[in-house]
Image (tube, rainbow, N blue to C red):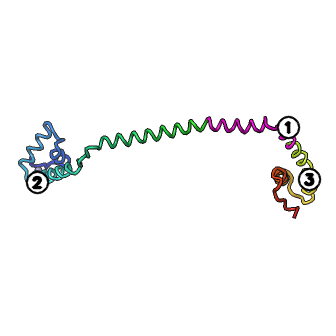
Amino acid sequence: MTAFHLTEEQIQGLADGTLRGPEGFAAREHADGCDECSGELAMYAALVDRLSTLSDPPVPDDFTVEVLDAVDHRERALQQRRHTVLAAIPAGLIGLFAIFGWALSVAPTAHVDRFLEAWTLARHVLAAAAPVVDATRLPLGLGALVFSAAIVALLLRAMRGGTAPTPASS
Ligand SMILES: [Zn+2]
């Protein structure tokens, strides 16, 4: 019995009470007859005692109330956000309907006319721009497309704005 001392785990188990049964009994018996192990056990027991007092801080009386309050608050915030999203969907749909309704019903002919005007202008611009593109030997395809698109966009903006400043009219 005295040939082997208790392992650290056994001493810990004895100290915190987790080592039970025959093994715990034998370990306790050894510690009782062994100065070295009983000294270590006393040290561990003191440590466990101190840890147990440290690990149980006083719980405030309103702890549960506070936790429930926080949970409730969070739940309410989430619900409110959900309601906001749900309320935004019909609002967005109404906005879309309003825009489409305005575009289609208020002055449909005016819109079509403006579109046709822009299209005619764009065709003229494209026809005028083609030789320029050829002459300057810009790569056809994407480059020409971007160039024409930029001109069309500028003209469209000038048309739509009416008062938009044009660089050539200075
Ligand atoms: Zn021992």
Q: Is residue 89 visible?
A: yes
Q: How far is disc 2 from disc 1 in space, using C-alphas?
A: 102 Å
Residue occupying image coordinates x 16% and y 42%: 17
Which residue occupies the extreme front position in the image? 106
- Bin the neighbour count of mark 1 within 10 Å (Cα to Cα): few under 14, some 14-19, many 20 and up: few
Q: Which span of residues is magenta-colored?
A: 90-114
Foreground tag (3 vs 1): 1
Q: Specify the amino acid type for callout 2.
A: Gly
Residue 39 disc label: 2
Label 2: element kind: helix
Instruction: Give the residue displayed 90% in from the left and 56% down from the top.
Output: 133
Q: Quadrant of residue 62?
A: top left
Check disc 3 and give the amino acid type.
Ala
Q: Secondary structure at mark 1?
A: helix
In which quadrant is the C terminus drawn? Answer: bottom right
Q: Circle 1 sits on which residue?
A: 109
The residue that mark 3 highlights is 130
Residue 48, percent from left and from top: 18, 50
Of label 2 and label 1, which has the lower sequence position?
2
Residue extending furthest toward the left? 33
Q: Main secondary structure of the magenta part?
A: helix
Q: CA distance from mark 3 to mark 1?
A: 31 Å
Q: Which element carries disc 3, helix, strand or loop? A: helix
Does 113 sit left or right of 56 as displayed? right
Image quadrant in which you'd find residue 66:
top left
The three-letter code of the residue at mark 1 reads Thr
On the rendered structure, is 166 left or right of 131? left
Between discs 2 and 3, the one toward the N terminus: 2
Percent across and percent down for residue 99 are 72, 39
Name the N-terminal-most of marks 3 and 1: 1
Compute the Cα span from label 2 to label 3.
Answer: 101 Å
Res 143 seen here: no
